[in-house]
Image (cartoon, rainbow, N blue to C red):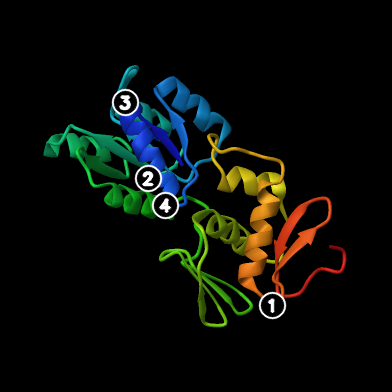
Amino acid sequence: MLLVEDDANLRFGVAAALRAAGLAVDEAVDLPQADEALFVTAYDCVVFDRMLPAGDAVEYVEELRRSGRAVPVLFLTARDTVADRVEGFARGGDDYLVKPFAVPELVARVRSLCRRAPAVTPPVLRVGDLEIDTARRRVRRGGVLLTLTSREFAVLEVLADRADQAVSRAELVERCWDEMAEHRSNVLEVLVSQLRRKLGAPPLLHTVRGTGYRLAVAEDPAS
């Protein structure tokens, strides 16, 4: 997701909370930065502070809609009149949260909007006896609840959504880590090793030589 907020302290706190909830967060401080980010990345959700140095984000979102961009948008703002909220929805917003706000509510609203994105992930993903509840963020194998970190869940969710297909290392890093993350060369490999241990036997998470990883009941002989 993309967070567009010019208040550095608020942006830092909100981004930290969203990352702690397992979301990959890119940050922008104004509309030109947001425009550049949206040009190069397909986000599942964008949170805009409404009043930014370059103008009212509502006007920018209205232009996005006219250009055919359907990315879900939440406006985060101190403008709390009914007229303000109606205007936000009428000009392209999908949700509207007034400051001050409760961070857990923001996280819940962002997750809801991410599920509205064009590539919607089913609420429950299944691969063999592995069940991934994407709404409740719970994973069970053979009926046994597994304890995963937010990053492990994110990687597993991407792989399960593309079950039986090879997913490249580059795509996993792009989808599950944000631009502020430390991208050490072996960070994905270490996480996959931990995830394999937690998933147990028989193995479901397979390495595809020269490409990345595949989540499947049976390993491809070419892997």
The residue drawn where x is 44% and y is 42% is 71
* Cα–Cα gap, marks 3 and 1: 48 Å
In this view of the protein, which residue sits in the foreground, 199 or 71?
Answer: 199
The three-letter code of the residue at mark 3 reads Asp
Instruction: Please state the horizontal and vertical placement of residue 160, each as a whole percent of the image.
Output: 61, 64
* Left/right of residue 122 with respect to residue 72 in the rendered view: right
Secondary structure beneath disc 3? loop
Tag 1 or tag 4, which sits nearer the N-term? 4
Give the labeled residue for mark 4: 21
In this view of the protein, which residue sits in the foreground, 158 or 83?
Answer: 158
Secondary structure beneath disc 2? helix
**Mark 4 touching mark 3, by CB under 8 A?**
no
* Left/right of residue 183 with respect to residue 213 in the rendered view: left
* Image quarter of the C terminus: bottom right
Instruction: Please state the horizontal and vertical placement of residue 197, each as a whole percent of the image.
Output: 66, 68
**Mark 3 touching mark 1, by CB under 8 A?**
no
For disc 4, the neighbor class at 10 Å (few under 14, some 14 to 19, many from 20) is some
* Left/right of residue 189 with respect to residue 6 in the rendered view: right
The residue drawn where x is 51% and y is 58% is 149
The three-letter code of the residue at mark 4 reads Ala
The residue drawn where x is 53% and y is 60% is 153
Give the labeled residue for mark 2: 17
